[in-house]
Image (cartoon, coloured by chain):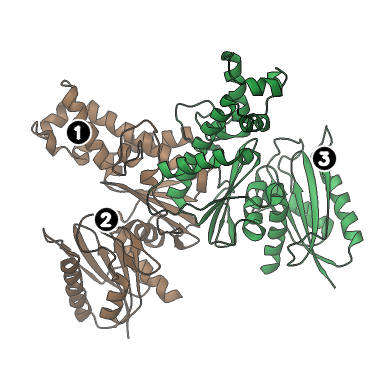
Chain colours: A green, B brown
Amino acid sequence: MTSLILGIDFGGSKNTVGLVKNDSKRLLDNRRQKSAPNASAQSDLDSVLEMSRELLALYPGRLRAVGVSFGGPVDYQNGTVKLSYHVSGWEEYPLKDQLQKEFGVPVSVDNDANAGALGEWYFGAGGKCSSLFYITVSTGIGGGWVLNGSPYRGANSLAGEIGHMVVAPTGPICVCGKRGCLEALASGTAISYHAVARMKTESGTGTTLRHLCDNNLEFITSELVSYAAKEGDELAKELLLDAARFLGIGIAQVLLLMNPERIVLGGGVTKAGKFYWDEVYRSILEHVLPGISIDVVQAQLIDEAPLWGAIALANQLLLK
Amino acid sequence: MTSLILGIDFGGSKNTVGLVKNDSKRLLDNRRQKSAPNASAQSDLDSVLEMSRELLALYPGRLRAVGVSFGGPVDYQNGTVKLSYHVSGWEEYPLKDQLQKEFGVPVSVDNDANAGALGEWYFGAGGKCSSLFYITVSTGIGGGWVLNGSPYRGANSLAGEIGHMVVAPTGPICVCGKRGCLEALASGTAISYHAVARMKTESGTGTTLRHLCDNNLEFITSELVSYAAKEGDELAKELLLDAARFLGIGIAQVLLLMNPERIVLGGGVTKAGKFYWDEVYRSILEHVLPGISIDVVQAQLIDEAPLWGAIALANQLLLK
């Protein structure tokens, strides 16, 4: 009988389930659903269970394990979600226990940064190297480690918080309350925030950006900034170069402290183009020591990294 | 027949060998010799071999393995010393091969930061925790990792370079050429450098310090600054508090990125006293995220950490 693995990605705004045959690198099938406008933990869970049952009914075989990526802090040891920043009702939710009861097989639950790291390591740009750091630069900035083939989570499942490393002590205040965190300087949120602030005070700048948002500055996003930069908007380009420079400083600190074999860089902001990547590299080189190899590559799985990470988590359960 | 383990510490200014029975936490005996004024790799090696032969002749038994801590960069994989900053002739020296020929047993060679980390983990303040970072704040600032019971060295044996993490981007130039490295702000060298600079431009400050060095500012060391602070010198205290604050920022970055179970802090500068440690803690708390546990303890083995790390390296060879 075919052995099946189920991967689940609770993504905050959308949930995805994917089914694979054991050891396969190709999805048999998947289902995706946006979270309801007033989604709760229960409605997300109901939706995920319904999609899972649908898939399992379509593909005969024996379910062996379930892996879960959750978009928020998770206590990996006991499989409990600490909270979600997007959906209510997840506080201290025993997700692993609940899913083990539902499916009757071993379940592994981790946060999306660790899952994304494991996904890229196992199925994507990581190439199963001995030490990998995965960075996702999106609304926020997160990171996850894979060392010697396993996620390294740290003492409180909080390793990888590169977004809150301080790269400019006199910089802007971050959502965490500290000053000059990488996230406050290089995330998508930071880029759009700084774009709006600059356009409000400098009337002559950001012509293309203003055009793109029809002069409604509240519609500015980091995607629009990227697009404007490609269209030649000088302000947009300057903001992205600043963000890239700070990201390079953050990555250099990672290289100095851990000297990982490879860094996999993903997330919407990193799609800004070659000039952005060139500046990230230039800044890393400026801030690192000689002798430390710099192997920074683009994520391959893009938005699918957490789902594939969930599948890899389930695979790891079967190896034990 | 008694199984014996030999540990060797090439310390730059002095070399030490120690002999233990397998699995013992007590030295049978040891020998130490200062490096000659014009020491070379050959003279250091001759001295170490002579001390080793003397010890082995005194204690009957079968030598099973040799572990080596080297005060400078080492390629762990092939056991080659890259160079010494203190003694000439070590460039690309195949130390492991050479010692395996001499002793006819397996040899393991690592740098002193990694060895110190392993020594503290195995025999000292590390308590065999699952993830440990060891920091030594002395002339320079170095660090080493022990993850899951083994030194984590990174892709180029260069992990742990906390001394060159940037904690103040507009700060002073470091020996490495970058600006605002932790080493340029919190090492013993930095503390004495800043003390001299301040006393040269501010005639009314550092009364006790001036007295202690008989107004010969070239005799100022970080030990003197520590001593003056204990005697109530305001300038000395201010300089140590600044250094402690920057060290706390550096440690917070380590906690954010790796969330280690424990940090072991050693080296001469950390002997400055309670006010120094209090400021390190305060600064860590200011710069870390909630939920990350902060377990920063004083090194126990002090100057002996590299020697005990060498012994632990040899022990690990026997476990394979």
Give percent across and percent down for residue A155: 54, 50
At label 3, the amino acid type is: Lys
**C-alpha separation, residue under disc 2 versus residue under disc 1:** 23 Å
Disc 1 residue type (three-letter):
Ala
The residue lying furthest to the bottom in this view is: B1
Position of B308 compared to A150: left or right? left
* Residue at image mark 3: A34
Q: Which label lies toward us, 2 or 3?
A: 3
Kind of residue indicated by mark 2 = Asp
Whether tag 2 and tag 3 are in contact, CB under 8 A, the answer is: no
Residue with the mark numbered 1? B228
> Distance between the Cα atoms at labels 2 and 3?
59 Å
Corner quadrant of residue B238: top left
Q: Which residue is mark 2?
A: B303
Viewer-side label of 3, 1: 3
Image x and y of residue B246, in percent = 37, 35
